[in-house]
Amino acid sequence: MEPMLPSGSGNLEDLAREVVSRSAAMGGQLHPRSQEGVANLLRLINSYYSNMIEGNSTHPVDIERAMRDDYSSDPTKRNLQIESLAHIKCQKQIYGWLQDDPGLDSSDPAVIRRIHCVFYSELPDSLKKVKHAETDEIIDVVGGELRHRDIKVGSHIGPSHATVPQFMQRFFDVYRRDRHHGVMPVIAAAAAHHRLMWIHPFLDGNGRVTRLYTDACLQSVPVLGYGLWNVSRGLARNRDRYMDALGWADAQRQGDTDGRGNLSNKGLIRFCCFFLEICLDQIDYMHQLLRLDAILERLMGYARMRAEKIIPTPTPRHTGMKPEAGKILQEVLLRGEMTRGDAASASGLGRSGRDVLAQLLDEELLVSSMPKGLVRVNFPTHISTYLFPDLYPTQMLS
């Protein structure tokens, strides 16, 4: 799978610098506690788009319902909800690993196997099986276990299963964190995304595990601001181009001017350029949505539309909303977190501000880590459509 890193393209370094600088600029737009609400929403959205790439569409509303143990009665839809939750839980665990052990290297084969293991541990038995493309044999997939069979995915024939451990070790030797400096870790993350897909180390789940791995890479580089945007949305919304780009990097070397490895250096450059351009597109999209003046205005606009009944309540049991609720949401967003008394006072309604606060908590627009504790903003799907236009399709997919 050489070359492991693209060579001879200064444009890649320029793109990587832009990714680092533009992403870092996002971090200063919101209070860190308010950023957590955005990051939690994007884990759900990341799950939706990562599964979409694999051909499974579970709408974010249904994913959120599953998070409350509200599953579809349709077994197929229920399984897809569980699959989405498995992705979200795995993301959270990876984030926890990186927080607990800053030295953890996500390119370590043991860590990649652990990601696969955690993801599959959350799946029902019916989703832990794969059908052999030629024989129709049903094969059990064991979480964290490297594949013990040879594979063909489209036109790509993966390396022999007997050599996968050696390929994974080579992967770690090249992409380990301590080998790269400056903007090279970002370029290495892009290249590693393809090369892990190329190895195809597991019988199934390689696409999801690769995107989870890439998330971990970008967090641990670190690319400051990652988590306020994610790459899976961009890849899913450009799925055909993504598949084409993977194919470019799969290509064999094209003559003496195309590097010195077995695979095409030009193809790897094209893939990495595509990947980093997708990153920039997603950074720019979320940067505009998270401009403080714009999000404050949309919070007030949401409360006003609810008060005027222009938009529906999230559930039949919820009532209309006083426009002053927007003042509470604005103030909590700005401060990051507030006492319940201060939040209620921000409405300007006196004692009745407590009722408005209670409704915001009931609708999970505000959340707290403990009863009667400090409150912070949250972005459930029923408000995210208005705060973050086009983040995901508003219509349920058939």
Image (tube, helix red, strand yellow):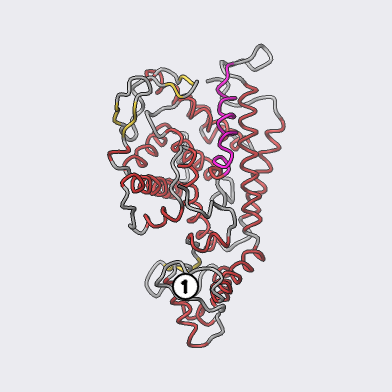
Q: Residue at x 39, y 57 (%)?
A: 65
Q: Residue at x 37, y 38 (%)?
A: 114
Q: Residue at x 56, y 77 (%)?
A: 323
Q: Main secondary structure of the magenta part?
A: helix
Q: Nearer the viewer, residue 161 or 232?
A: 232
Q: Which residue is mark 1?
A: 360
| Picture mark count | 1
Q: Where in the figure is residue 141, as x and y percent of width and height?
A: 32, 32
Q: Where in the figure is residue 161, as x and y percent of width and height?
A: 38, 20
Disc 1 on helix, strand or loop? helix
State the image quarter where residue 253 is shown: top right
Q: Dot 1 surroundings within 10 Å: few (below 14), some, or many (20 or more)? A: many
Q: Nearer the viewer, residue 27 or 275?
A: 275
Q: Is residue 284 above or below residue 268?
A: below
Residue at the outermost front position = 398
The residues colored magenta run 234-252
Is 187 contained in the magenta span? no
Judged left or right of residue 113, residue 256 is: right
Q: Residue at x 69, y 43 (%)?
A: 18
Q: Where in the figure is residue 389, as x and y percent of width and height?
A: 59, 57
Q: Is residue 39 above or below residue 248?
A: below
Q: Is residue 308 above or below residue 14?
A: below
State the image quarter where residue 287 is shown: bottom right
Judged left or right of residue 104, residue 9 is: right
Q: Where in the figure is residue 87, as x and y percent of width and height?
A: 41, 45
Residue at the outermost top position = 256
Q: Is residue 346 above or below residue 135?
A: below
Instruction: Kindly identify the amino acid type of the residue bearing the numbered disc 1.
Output: Leu
